Image: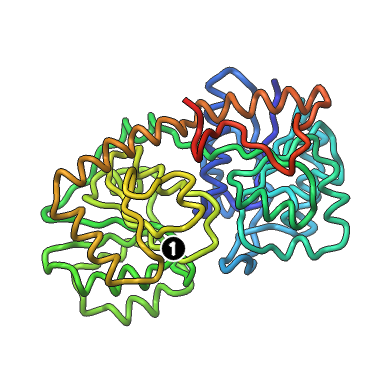
């Protein structure tokens, strides 16, 4: 099968959608399919099989800044790429996002599968014509019930809830980066909804010997560095390579995800679980798709630095508790393997090509999920 996967977000910027796009492309290619990813890139493409569509324009949305490319130059490159390729199916991630996914919907040069990732609110649904654009999608998928509900509220339709995936072998092959003393790892944009401030406040309540790795950057970086400059236990690492990210997640004693809202699925939790690192995270509906209370991760009320500090201390100070989280987390991550996700989407692609949409009259059905998680 010749598959075109389109991302509206720059592949050279960190983000959960980009991780899913690139990982899915690799897994489909491993199965012998011809896969090409079309997306903006601010620099060299991150892997082979990518057609860069030009630079992105940072745009505020959903409490964050999205690296999208809604400009005319990107539109022309997208049109040219779709005309040059003869795809059997197109897979659009965030299909209504301005940029190449909308262009692909207008052209509809092949049967289209659309995947919705975001939960919360989207300005895209306020633009006239979005329902018509959505009607050009043969099969609609969403990564969580929350994402499906947002799409249903915005443009109506029927959605299949299809989990996000994690590439287990990449974490198995990674070499852990370890340092002396207990270490907490954080990765995510430095913006209010990600809750980094809560974690930094919690650090003041943790023992002196605890170290914190802060990866990535964002609009809050300089302000937070100034505010916490006297805490030398905090290492501001900035953007890191994918290899370093894997090594630090795998080498940390605990991985912390203190987000406040706007998370539709816990991919970062899955990555830590795949790496064999215990997780402490905010108790958000999106994260409960992955972690069940007290089982695969310590879940705490979002925004409460005191409770977060207690949970981090508990995991760091109790090896048996940490080991239980690691064992349950790894088992959970295996249920969300990228290989399983690739097979799920291959089945969907075949139905899109055959002209068959979701086989349910409900607003959305759960495909690959059973009682809150993928079926074994």
Q: Quadrant of residue 230?
A: bottom left
- Count of marks overlaid on the render: 1
Q: Nearer the viewer, residue 93 or 154?
A: 154
User: Looking at the image, which residue is at 63% across and 21% down?
Assistant: 33
The scheme the figure's colours follow is: rainbow
- Residue at x 56%, y 19% (from the top left corner): 31
Seen in the image, is 165 located left or right of residue 183? right
Above-or-below relation of 246 to 299? above
Report helix, strand or loop for mark 1. Answer: loop
Q: Give above or below for 147 relative to 372.
A: below
Q: Residue at x 11, y 64 (%)?
A: 209
The residue at the point 21 percent across, 53 percent down is 315
Task: Answer with left or right where residue 183 lies relative to residue 60.
Answer: left
Q: Position of residue 187 (x, y in %)?
A: 38, 57
Considering depth in this image, is 277 or 74 the residue closer to the camera? 277
- Residue 194 image offset from top left, x and y in percent: 45, 65
Quadrant in the picture for the N terminus: top right
Residue 295 coordinates in the image, percent (x, y): 32, 44
For mark 1, does the 10 Å Cα neighbourhood hold few (<14), some (14 to 19), or many (20 or more) residues? many
Q: Which residue is under mark 1?
A: 259
Tell me if 347 is positioned left or right of 209 in this view.
right
């Amino acid at each position: 099968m010749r598959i075109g996967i389109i991302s509206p977000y720059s592949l050279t910027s960190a983000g959960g959608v980009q991780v899913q796009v690139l990982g899915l492309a690799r897994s489909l290619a491993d199965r012998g399919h011809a896969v090409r990813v079309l997306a903006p890139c601010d620099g060299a493409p991150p892997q082979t099989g990518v057609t860069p569509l030009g630079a992105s324009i940072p745009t505020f949305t959903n409490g964050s800044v999205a690296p999208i490319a809604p400009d005319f130059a990107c539109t022309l490159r997208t049109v040219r790429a779709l005309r040059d390729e003869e795809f059997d199916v197109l897979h659009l991630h965030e299909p209504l996002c301005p940029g190449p996914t909308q262009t692909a919907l207008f052209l509809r040069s092949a049967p289209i599968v659309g995947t919705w990732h975001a939960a919360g609110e989207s300005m895209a649904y306020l633009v006239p014509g979005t329902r018509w654009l959505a009607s050009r999608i043969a099969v609609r998928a969403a990564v969580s019930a929350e994402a499906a509900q947002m799409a249903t509220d915005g443009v109506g339709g029927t959605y299949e809830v299809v989990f996000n995936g994690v590439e287990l072998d990449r974490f198995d092959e990674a070499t852990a980066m370890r340092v002396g003393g207990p270490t907490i790892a954080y990765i995510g944009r430095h913006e209010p909804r990600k809750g980094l401030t809560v974690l930094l406040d919690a650090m003041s309540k943790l023992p002196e010997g605890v170290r914190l790795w802060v990866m990535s950057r964002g609009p809050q970086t300089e302000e937070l560095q100034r505010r916490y400059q006297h805490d030398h236990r905090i290492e501001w690492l900035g953007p890191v390579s994918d290899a370093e990210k894997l090594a630090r997640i795998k080498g940390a004693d605990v991985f912390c995800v203190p987000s406040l809202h706007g998370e539709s699925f816990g991919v970062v939790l899955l990555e830590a679980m795949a790496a064999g690192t215990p997780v402490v995270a905010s108790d958000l509906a999106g994260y409960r798709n992955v972690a069940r209370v007290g089982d695969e991760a310590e879940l705490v009320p979002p925004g409460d630095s005191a409770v977060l500090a207690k949970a981090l201390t508990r995991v760091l100070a109790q090896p048996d508790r940490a080991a239980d989280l690691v064992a349950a987390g790894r088992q959970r991550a295996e249920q969300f393997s990228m290989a399983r996700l690739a097979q799920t989407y291959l089945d969907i692609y075949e139905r899109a090509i055959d002209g068959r949409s979701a086989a349910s009259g409900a607003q959305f059905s759960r495909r690959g999920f059973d009682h809150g998680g993928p079926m074994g």
